[in-house]
Amino acid sequence: MARNKFDVDESLATKFNYNHLKRIFKYVKPFKKQMGITIMIMLVASVASLLGPFLVKDAIDNKIINSDIKGLVILAGIYLATLIIGGVCLHLKIKIMTNVGQSIIYNIRKDLFEHLQKLPFSYYDSRPHGKILIRVVNYINSLSDLLSNGIINLITDLATLIIIIIFMLIIDVKLTIICLLGLPILFAGIFAIKNAQRKGWQIMSSKTSNLNAYIHESITGMKVTQSFSREKENYKIFEELNNNYRTAWLNCVRIMMLMGPMVDGTSSLVMAAVYIFGVAWMAQGVTVGVLIAFLGYIGRFWAPISNMANFYNSIINAMAYLERIFETMDEEPAVKDVVGAFEMPEIKGSVEFKNVDFAYEEDHKILNNISFKVNEGKSIALVGPTGAGKSTIINLISRFYNLNSGEILIDGVDISKVTLSTLRKQMGIMMQDSFIFSGTIMDNIRYGNIEATDEEVIEAAKKVHAHDFIANLEDGYNTEVNERGARLSAGQRQLISFARAILADPKILILDEATSSIDTKTELLLQKGLEELLKGRTSFIIAHRLSTIKNSDIIMCINKGTIVESGNHEELMRFKGEYYKLYMSQYKLLEAM
């Protein structure tokens, strides 16, 4: 189904299975020591707190009847000690498990983010970025309490329940059996709402994702929104998505709130039965102290059961988030190092395409049997109409996509057999989108080579004639720029991106519409700097302004996924084919202006 719309609910490629829960425990395993210590601490606290009703029974049945003041003081002292022990243990548990919980979340988020770095362009092209962002932040945050305190509380509550039952059996076996008869009733109710609960939280996660995607899109496109006065229409869309979120949330809460009344109702029924049978059996030896102590334990008996019911609730809720998180983690990188991949040797610069076929979608071929060879140090310009396959060719050189068939060789080495990092590190790539990261201009240029000195960064900026405008900014190279470079003009962003590519000192330089947003004066200066820069490098250049690529060694005209003609500017102009038509149409357009 369509994934790239904010108003389309995401469907899961695979259904949830309980192996996801096993899988999540690999993140818990490294902290088993801390969790073991916490469990012991909580068991001590549990035993201490459970002594209370037993002490009350002893006080009523023995100490008060016998006017044993000293015994009552001792019991009061023991009771106070149990409260202090419980408080200290709770403080230690919170301190340990807060650190453990955040460490678990840190590791899950780190693995997810690392995996996202490996996913291909097609993954990000096919869905709103807001729907990816919510997985890394919100969904993982929702698991925090479950994976730390939830697991500890479950184990502690189970142990506490067992201890309570032991105390209850010691006090009175028959009353204990009556108490246990309430459990089947509760379990039946829990399983009755399980499917509705899980489905509700799946819908909830989809509506949350949709809302987040639209907010992200709206913020990114705010300039366009205000330029076209779309605020009212956007508010209507937001209101609908927000209302869908609210409806889904309320539905989940309504289902979830059934759990409390079920536990309370069952507890009340059991309590009433214990009162009735307890009073009736007083003639058979049930004392007032036994009855009061037993009622005290019944209150404690249902507390861990209620906690475990809430934990079960949390598991059901978390399933909706785990499904999305693991779906992303299981997304297979379309482009990755093959088994036995080796490091790319130092590139000299020859590039060869051998019978290359490529399609983004099976029924829509972009490149059809492309073959050419370029010697090192040559500049190659790719021209042709929009959608002809120019950008696809340079994307394949960088191995951003896998071929359908054929080979691409650099210096005679099949690039499909080398590691991606050692291939791409030796290339300088400037795409059409001159992306600027938040930070300083110095940091943005150094992105191409993190080991470069300040002097090398400045030198790269001078080569592309970016130095003058940078030096005139309030803090020069230390000027802070916003995400996507909102403070800079389109031309300035391109010049910074160009300096970033130059700083990498690549043997193969790829420029995709590198001068499209630069004014004519700056472009002329840039061309002068590039003449020296391109010497000794193999460069692939895409430019719709054909005047900028006249001096290229080879110009390849691409149309409908094939090379229709190839040569230098003079040769192609004499041939009077596709390139001639493109060039003359631009020339006439300039004359008419």
Image (cartoon, rainbow, N blue to C red):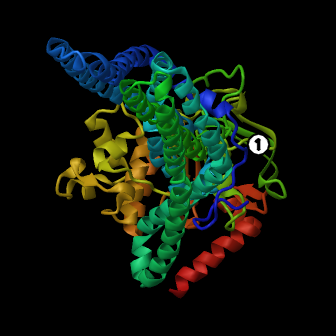
Relative to 444, say whether 470 is above or below. Answer: below
Q: Tell whether 406 sits left or right of 153.
A: right
Q: Tell whether 378 sits left or right of 281.
A: right
Q: Tell me if residue 523 can be seen.
A: yes
Please give the count of numbered marks on the rendered protein.
Answer: 1
Q: Tell whether 270 sits left or right of 371.
A: left
Q: Which residue is mark 1?
A: 403
Q: Residue at x 53, y 80 (%)?
A: 590
Q: Tell whether 481 sits left or right of 572.
A: left
Residue 505 image offset from top left, x and y in percent: 45, 36
Which residue is most to the front? Answer: 283
Residue 125 image offset from top left, x and y in percent: 61, 56
Residue 117 image offset from top left, x and y in percent: 54, 39
Q: Residue at x 38, y 50 (%)?
A: 437
Q: Depth check: 506 or 117 in front?
A: 117
Relative to 36, say whether 400 is above or below. Answer: below
- Report the amino acid beneath label 1: Leu
Q: Depth check: 269 or 135 in front?
A: 269
Residue 224 image offset from top left, x and y in percent: 44, 76
